[in-house]
Image (cartoon, rainbow, N blue to C red):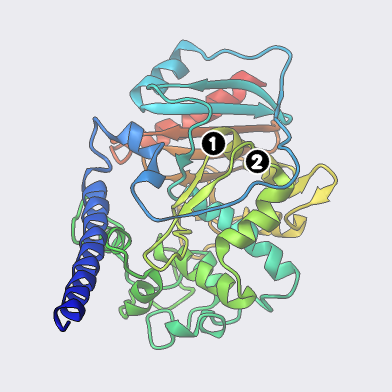
């Protein structure tokens, strides 16, 4: 009779080990995914299938059917020069809106209209728009509040003493190495935290070095955007996917249900883990072009849209607002969201044009590529008017 309890205990131990083995296999699979994410023969498929490789937080569609973007009566065509750029930069999707109508739409390299494509840092601009809603309603009392007021876990870190405004401007002063080519850089260490099921909150709180005083100079620091997510969660008691789905995406009526990548604790990777169709990236750009208004609804406060897309970051070039870029040559009405490997939402308010681009461009850091991209985006605007 004593053998039976022993057998039951052994069976339980085997089950626990099996579960642990499964969890470890998932960790290894995610780590392998990170290490092969940008390989030339995989990058296109990977960027449209991120949810198969990482933890995710889905976002439900609005209860009403999506409002499809209208098509212009006469779709436009690309010039040979723009077509050459599409091929050279491994563009996977291009959607252009003029006065809210689709004037051009095409997909490349075996991708399609229904693909949910990873935003990379374009997600930062979405978070900035969401942020303004909670500044307006008083959940966040002031941009000059310290981030630790809403994210006390950052007390004692390099963020202690930085204001929300500093972090919105990428002027937190936190020392952070954004070199994608360096395996040991902070940005790549952060990627491995996600792959291994770690905590981005803990990663942010572990940063203790500063390169300067908060608010003195712009330095692009991706983890700053995660800190903004911590502030939003602390101010509202809700997750960013919940807030984004209810307050931003439901009024927009997206055409496909989006999702965020998350860390091992289910916290959204708000600095780069949003996944949408290219049409819905364009739809968001149209919202910003329209001053935060969609149909009859003022989704994002108009004064916030103007403030976040105006140059405000301290120091010299590049020109930057609250998680939005402005061209360095200062043409009025232009603002853009940008992500690595060639993701763009380009907005020209004067022309009434939005250009949404997704790419798998492994050469995006090569000299001259950024200026070429800006020139071609402007050429697309000119061609579509």
Q: Quadrant of residue 333?
A: top right
Q: Nearer the viewer, residue 63 or 93?
A: 63
Q: Quadrant of the C terminus?
A: top right
Q: Is residue 180 visible?
A: no
Q: Is residue 140 visible?
A: yes
- The correct choice, above or below, for 166 with respect to 155 in the image is above
Q: Position of residue 291 (x, y in %)?
A: 74, 48
Q: Are marks 2 and 1 in contact (CB under 8 Å)?
A: yes
Q: Nearer the viewer, residue 243 or 129?
A: 243
Mark linked to residue 254: 2
Q: Quadrant of residue 233?
A: bottom right
Q: Secondary structure at mark 1?
A: loop
Q: Position of residue 218 (x, y in %)?
A: 44, 64
Which residue was labeled with disc 1? 277
Q: Position of residue 186 (x, y in %)?
A: 27, 64
Residue at 62 percent across and 53 percent down: it is 309
Q: Nearer the viewer, residue 233 or 79?
A: 233
Q: Quadrant of the N terminus?
A: bottom left
Q: Position of residue 97 (x, y in %)?
A: 65, 28
Residue at 54 percent across and 78 percent down: it is 163
Q: Residue furthest bottom?
A: 156
Q: How many numbered dots are placed on residues in this image? A: 2
In the visual, does 46 lie left or right of 185? right
In the visual, does 219 lie left or right of 42? right
- At label 1, counting other C-alpha atoms closer than 10 Å, the crowd grade (few under 14, some 14-19, many 20 or more) is many
In the visual, does 242 lie left or right of 260? right
Q: CA distance from mark 2 to mark 1?
A: 9 Å
- The correct choice, above or below, for 378 with respect to 201 in the image is above
| First reached walking from the N terminus: tag 2 or tag 1 | 2
In the visual, does 51 lie left or right of 283? left
Q: Residue furthest front?
A: 1
Residue at 57 percent across and 27 percent down: it is 95
């Amino acid at each position: 009779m004593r053998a039976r309890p022993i057998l039951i205990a052994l069976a339980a131990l085997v089950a626990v080990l099996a579960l642990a083995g499964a969890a470890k296999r998932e960790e290894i699979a995610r780590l392998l995914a990170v290490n092969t994410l940008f390989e030339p023969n995989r990058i296109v498929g990977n960027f449209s299938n991120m949810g198969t490789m990482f933890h995710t937080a889905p976002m439900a569609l609005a209860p009403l059917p999506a409002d499809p973007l209208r098509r212009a009566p006469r779709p436009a065509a690309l010039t040979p020069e723009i077509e050459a750029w599409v091929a050279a930069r491994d563009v996977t999707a291009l959607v252009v809106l003029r006065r809210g109508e689709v004037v051009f739409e095409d997909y490349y390299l075996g991708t399609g209209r229904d693909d949910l494509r990873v935003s990379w840092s374009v997600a930062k601009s979405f978070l900035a728009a969401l942020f303004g809603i909670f500044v307006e309603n008083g959940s966040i009392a002031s941009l000059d509040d310290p981030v630790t007021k809403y994210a006390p876990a950052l007390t004692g870190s390099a963020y202690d003493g930085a204001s929300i405004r500093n972090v919105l401007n990428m002027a937190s002063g936190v020392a952070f190495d954004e070199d994608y080519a360096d395996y040991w850089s902070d940005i790549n260490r952060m990627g491995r935290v996600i792959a291994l099921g770690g905590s981005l909150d803990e990663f942010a709180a572990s940063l203790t070095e500063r390169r300067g005083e908060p608010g003195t100079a712009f330095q692009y620091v991706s983890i700053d955007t995660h800190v903004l997510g911590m502030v939003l969660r602390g101010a509202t008691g809700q997750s960013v996917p919940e807030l984004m789905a209810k307050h931003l995406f439901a009024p927009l009526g997206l055409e496909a249900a989006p999702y965020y990548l998350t860390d091992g604790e289910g916290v959204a990777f708000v600095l780069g883990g949003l996944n949408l169709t290219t049409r819905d990236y364009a739809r968001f750009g149209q919202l910003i072009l329209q001053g935060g208004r969609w149909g009859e609804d003022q989704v994002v406060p108009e004064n916030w849209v103007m403030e976040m897309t105006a140059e405000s970051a301290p120091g010299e070039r590049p020109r930057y607002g609250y998680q939005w870029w402005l061209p360095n040559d200062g043409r009025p009405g232009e603002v853009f969201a940008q992500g690595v490997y060639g993701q763009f939402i380009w907005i020209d308010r004067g022309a009434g044009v939005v250009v949404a681009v997704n790419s798998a461009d492994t050469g995006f850091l090569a000299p001259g590529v950024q200026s070429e991209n800006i020139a071609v985006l402007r050429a697309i605007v000119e061609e579509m008017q």
